[in-house]
Amino acid sequence: MSVESFFVTKIYRSEIGEERLNAELDAACRSIAEDDTAGQTWCRKHGYPGYTSYASLNDLPWRVPAFTELVRILDKHVAAFVKELEFDLGRERLKLDSLWINVLPPGGVHTSHIHPHAVVSGTYYVAVPEGASAIKFEDPRLGFMMAAPPRKAKARPEQRAFVYVQPQPGTVLLWESWLRHEVPLNEAEEDRISISFNYRWR
Ligand SMILES: [Fe+2]
């Protein structure tokens, strides 16, 4: 007999490991979170725990040199992921559409969501203190599973309905934007800081 796997869901991981860049991003994220009053107001109004620049700032890669540098690195990782996914993009490549800061305080969560209007999404992790949340991904077929039995607790990661990926500072994760994910309760005693982004095709 033979058993093959089809319709795979890929999650890309790389450790960027540039300490100087990470320190610059860390300082920039903290000072922007402190100064961006429009962003703070948006977070308060929408019950967003901590801070996100998602709704208030759309020019971080041009505003801060460390972000410009990060985007150059991300472009290369996204290109590698596109190759791995065997996307046929014609003459085009995926382009950065948006990029934003997330500061998740102790006790904060970010509920389950997808990233509409994008092709590849991802996160670069700046500060991951001890006890900080992993990111949880959901099997995109979950809604079709109806009467399917649950998987064994020790099932291989690729067979599970949910997977948790634990990042460290300098980790970049990429996934296809339709893949549902969430950030469970942050049990760290300090802020968990990350930079998320969307890449579009056209
Ligand atoms: Fe997300």
Image: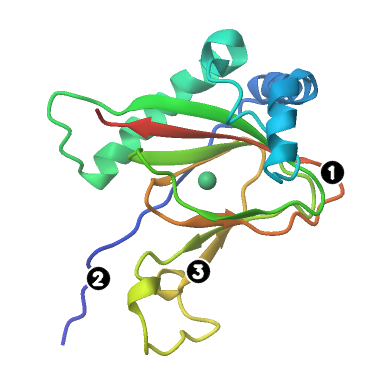
Q: Nearer the viewer, mark 3 or mark 2?
A: 3
Q: Earlier in the sequence, mark 2 or mark 1?
A: 2
Image point 79% across, 41% down: which residue? 191
The label on residue 13 is none
- Quadrant in which the C terminus is drawn: top left
Q: Distance of mark 2 from mark 1, alpha carbons? A: 41 Å
Left or right: 7 in relation to 143 = left
- Residue 88: x and y, percent? 15, 38
Residue 51 seen by the camera = no
Nearest the viewer among 202 and 80 is 202
Of circles 2 and 1, which is in front?
1
Q: Which mark is residue 190?
A: 1
Q: In the image, is 147 to the left or to the right of 35?
A: left
Amino acid type indicated by mark 3: Phe
Q: Which residue is mark 3?
A: 162
Res 127 → quadrant:
top right
The residue tagged with tag 1: helix, strand or loop? loop
Kindly identify the amino acid type of the residue bearing the numbered disc 1: Glu
Instruction: Identify the residue position indicated by label 2 in the image.
Output: 5
